[in-house]
Amino acid sequence: MSAAVHLLPLSVVLPITAGVLAPALFHRRHNACSWWAITAAALTLATTLTLVSEALDGGLVRYPVGGWPAPYGIELVFDGLGILMGSAAGLLTLLILIASRAFVQTEATPQRHSLFHGLVLINLGGMNGFLAASDLFNLFVFMEVFSISAYALVALARGPVAALAALKYLIVGAVSSMLVLLAIALLHAQTGSLNMSDIGDRLAAAQAPAAAGLALGCLVVGFLVKAAVFPLHFWLPDAHASAPSPVSALLSGLVVKMGIVGLIRTRMLFAEADIFSLVALDLLLVWLGVAAIVIGAVLAMIQRELKLMLAYSTVTNMGYIALGLGLATPAAVGGALAHMGFHALIKTGLFLSAGALVLSTGLSRIDDLRGLAQRMPVSSAALTLALLAVAGLPPTAGFVGKWQIALGALEAGQPWLIAVVMSGALLTLAWAIRIINSLYFLPPARGQVLTADEAPLSIRAPILMLGLVAMVGGLAGAMVLEWIEPLSFRILEAGHGH
Amino acid sequence: MRSALALVLVVVLAALMMAGVSQLPPPGEADQAVHRHVAANYLADGVEEGGTGNRVTAVLLDYRALDTYGEVVVIFAALIAVLLVRSAGGPRTQPPPRRVPVSPVVDQVIRLMTPFIALFALFMIIEGHVLPGGGFQGGVVLGALMILLSLALGPDRLRGALHTGALFWLRAVAPLAFTVSALAGLGLVGWWFALPEPGWMREFALVLLELAIGFGGAAALTGFFLSLEEDIHR
Amino acid sequence: MVTELFDLRPVLAPLVSALCALGIVLLGHHERWRIALSLAAAVVKFALVWSMLPATLSGTVFVFNAGEILPGLPFAFRVDALGMFFALVSSTLWVLTTIYAIAYMRGSHALRRFFGFFALCISTTVAIAFAENLLTLFIFYELLTLCTYPLVIHSGTLKARRAGRRYLAYTLSGGAALLAGMALLYHLTGSLSLSQPGLVDPATPPKTLLILFVLLIGGFAVKAAVMPLHAWLPSAMVAPTPVSALLHAVAVVKAGSFGLLRVIYNVFGVNLLASLGYTAVLAVIAALTIIVASLMALRQDVIKLRLAWSTISQLSYIVLAACLLTPLAALAAVIHIANQAFAKITLFFVAGAIEKRTGKTRVSELDGLGQIMPWTMGACTIACLSFMGVPLLAGFITKWYLSAGALAAGMPIYVAVMMLSALLNATYWLPIIYRAYFKPCPDPSLSREEPEILLLGPILACAAYVVLLGIGAQAPAMPFALAESAVNFAFGLELSRP
Amino acid sequence: MVVLFAVGLYIVLTSQNLLKKIIGLNIMETSVFGLIVTSGMVDGGSPPLLGRGLEAPYASPVTHALVLTGIVVALSVTALALVLIVRVKRECGSIELDELLEPEE
């Protein structure tokens, strides 16, 4: 129990405190506020990374909060998911904050800057808490923390569209939170405890399979909504398209992944309890994944708006992750987890570079962005790199997840799934090429001369870095996969060596 | 057509839930799972460990302190979200609103009652750890008082009274207090969010936290009301 | 006999022109730099590849392993005989094509982009040649598609863009099929390495073997323009001549057929395929392609389209030869890669020169060109004769070995196919020669004057090489010996040739 | 509790007016809180206050704590929703869903 253990709650409390202080300290000095936020995010990233190194060699990092042991007090656990998504959340929030220095000037009025930075930091704290929570109710509370900040951030943009989209997102999110709370109530009534592994052990004794089934159903539906998996994804396109780009990057890249994390936690809980086989759940995930991949890609192809296409591509990639989890073979689950991490990286790059283009030209339809590459070479290059990555071409980061899921499909004896994975990749490539085409090869439409000038350095640096990392990410595939190996095994058996 | 579809969906869901809930152990029996396990432990600890009579406050502030911390953060996030999302600022388009026509009787009653309500709210907050009550409930009462006052005296005077800078700090007091106590816990006892050893120190910490939550809650409520009120009249 | 030798050269060769591409993009706007860089890269690459020739001839194999991208799949290069052969052909031709392109493209638009992608294209081709496993090969195979796409739609007209879209559709779906096949192969054997004569273990159920065969061959067949999947080739003729020369004689098409050879010899292995009998079906398809494509070539009046259709039929020579599964036929397949490349590129250069010099693009307009451009037309005649299989020229050797191979394989029918195709070749090449020499030139204004030296040089060099290949087949330093060692390796037997 | 939840959900799904949706949401929330509290109730039990001379059996403090936190969360979500509704009203002129969706389609 080395001192590093105490860093775990720090990774939650630090960003939140910084977020809380931001509006108070800076409601007048605006740009100082963004530096404050960036330093806070950097510190959180540092804490998470030390935790990662600790967890990598030491195994699970457990932290009983307030000194009370597990079933009585709340316990924070830093496991594989924490490593993967915690580091992704820290790094990407830092990059988004750096990039949003330029975005926020145009989108929000001055005095709201400090509020924006405050919410982003609270969102980061909420996500870190959500990843580390092994107590069901604590999971719910942190879910609310980052959901509320997400609802508000979507509504940041001026104009009615953003407000309506945020409202839609809020209502759907609130309904899904209520479902999760209902499930918590049911589980608590049966087992008396709130700690997930504790519930798992006691659930069998409660002999109330229907109630446990209902709880499982509510939890799954709740988290599917949060993860925007196919049938329950309708809130995502409007929210992501109308939100300012750094916010949609935050949403698509990270917040949506938290839904998947919730799903994994539920699966681990019920696998441990093993009252009934989870085959039905896996089958559901597989079918939802397949539907999400195809329909997401098709919808993305018929869109005219750039950011809407990216939003639908999030639905496709969520479909891949759901498919990988549903197949429940080590390769597929490993692929799904790797894809979660890599997709967060790629999608943030995509939204930020797209945002850079939209910001400086003020146009968001693809046809208006024709021939922009000459005017904005760096951001178009970053967008192209990220687009190739999201399409899953071999050397890029997107390829690793797809390859592993295809292998998993074979292991699970469902070869036809490979066709789905491939067609998803092809369809994504189709609309990606359409964007690249209009950026590089088509003359400006209707002869209007694009007077846009290149995005400021504070945007170009992060997006170029993200683009390059996405392009070359595939080469690190083997390392990341064997990093995730223990986690995917733990998820599958919900290893009793919890 | 849409409503018919929704109706069918809801009925199906209700049937499912009915089946599920009915399997739960009937409420009210003393010996079923809920009481045996964790709750019993909290109750059994008794006064000496918990240091507070009101076990609910003990659970809230001691055993599951992180939940309450999360909750306080949620309230704060909602507050700055409201400020962020409010429709664009800009000067008032309409003339300053004349006060809501409040009959003199109501006006006098409010002025008369204010001190008592305030006292009651404070009592609830401070005595929270012994008698039923506690930070949130006290905070809500205080918030309600603020709203009543703004009705009676008119929002501008109320808003004027609170200096904007101070308003921000007041709003941030709850989460900050919690962080400080968490750090104190780390320092003194060695765990985050732990409360200091029983005795006067723990009482003091509890009261401090209750006060912070109470004022934080009140500030949030007034914040919500003021921004809503301002938007509607804008 | 095969000693694995770690060496940096297999990586340096593709890297050189990749760096050159980067250089061109960065400082290519003024012409001097652009030419200097492309030429330097071409020569350096040429030298590097040739420097490895003596070692490969003597049996040592250079290996470069850059660690694992995915579990069990290293990013590695391995210079074996077959890879060396293909790299040799492409790097030699690339030097000539660069010279030709510099002259041909002078004055046209967006040259910086053109030469950048041009260099990138060839670096991927050489990387494909040296790839040690299917994954590395697939990475560069897809990159090749993406690099050639901007070249195909270089002129930017609507027709070019539509051709580009069709080209992408075909090649990318081929790539997807290939990826699916690779997943299946990895699932069955746990590795994708191409370093042994046969990877698939014969015990696997025939049904999966069939699916694997169809997927892998289908993937490569698209780029090798085998009949049902060839439609993209004629429409891609809209590209400027050096691009279609590079595309259809050296890079893209050959990569497809090279991949096919790899699959047949390295993945399945000769004896396994002989037992399975799938290659017989493929041989029939290839034969059909040869005949039908030749018939189509007859009907084309535009020179470049005729060349395109003749390429399709020539490529199927390689496929047919490979499918006969006898050492002699295999030798024909490997040799034909070089013969077809040199002959076809000469014809493309000639077509380009004619178009540049006289603006004529149709066969019917070629009357009397023999007098106006004797040297160019002389080279053209050599190339045409070589296609017709006239002895002492390169084409003859392939036909000779192919028929010998067919006889050895006990399938005389294919000898008849050879004869028929030789006849068909004659019917569509002779009119060009006849018109050029025996018809008076209708347009008096054309004075007797050769195209500029930069165009004529490469034409003559290629024609000379065709002759050299024909006569000096047995000469020591010639690629023939290399082809032999490739075949020995594939068949694992020692050919008695000195 | 279940009926209340179903009613709330029905309102959220079908009501045209945004405000009604929020009210429906609140009904759902109250039903869930009701379920939590009742699951912690004990017949004839006394509130969990030690040292005040009340004897066992006590109601479970855990459920009370959960509900407290739940209510606060529900409050914040509703507050945010109301502000959004006011903003939609000001900027779109109406909060009837069918009118709002016309201009966009």
Image (cartoon, coloured by chain):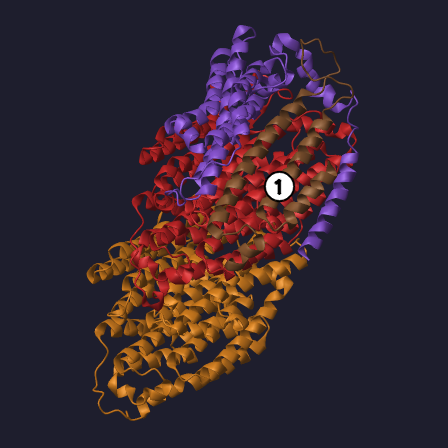
Chain colours: A red, B purple, C orange, D brown
Task: Tell me if residue A94 can be seen.
Answer: yes
Give how far across and how far down residue B195 sits, in percent. Answer: 54, 14
* Residue C166 relative to residue A114: left or right: right
Looking at this rendering, what residue extends furthest in the top direction? B199
Q: Chain of mark 1?
A: D
Q: Where C135 sits versus C246, above or below?
A: above
Give how far across and how far down residue B226 sits, in percent. Answer: 47, 34
* Residue B194 relative to residue A106: left or right: right
Q: How many numbered callouts?
A: 1
* Residue B36 relative to residue C215: left or right: right
Closer to us: D58 or A370: D58
Secondary structure beneath dot 1 equals: helix
Task: Tell me if residue B86 can be seen.
Answer: no
Residue placed at 48% from the left, 64% from the top? C171
Closer to us: B122 or B181: B122
Q: Looking at numbered disc 1 in the image, what kind of residue is underneath it?
A: Ile
Crowd class of label 1 (few under 14; some 14 to 19; many from 20; radius 10 Å): some
Closer to us: B68 or D28: D28
Quadrant containing the C terminus of chain C in the rendered view: bottom left
Image quadrant where residue A116 sits = top left
Residue placed at 57% from the left, 33% from the top? D75
Image quadrant where residue C410 sits = bottom right
The residue that disc 1 covers is: D23
Give how far across and how far down residue B49 sits, in percent. Answer: 61, 9
Q: Where A450 sits versus C282, above or below?
A: above
Q: Where A348 sits versus B142, above or below?
A: below
Give how far across and how far down residue A456 sits, in percent. Answer: 30, 46
Q: Where C16 sits versus C342, above or below?
A: above
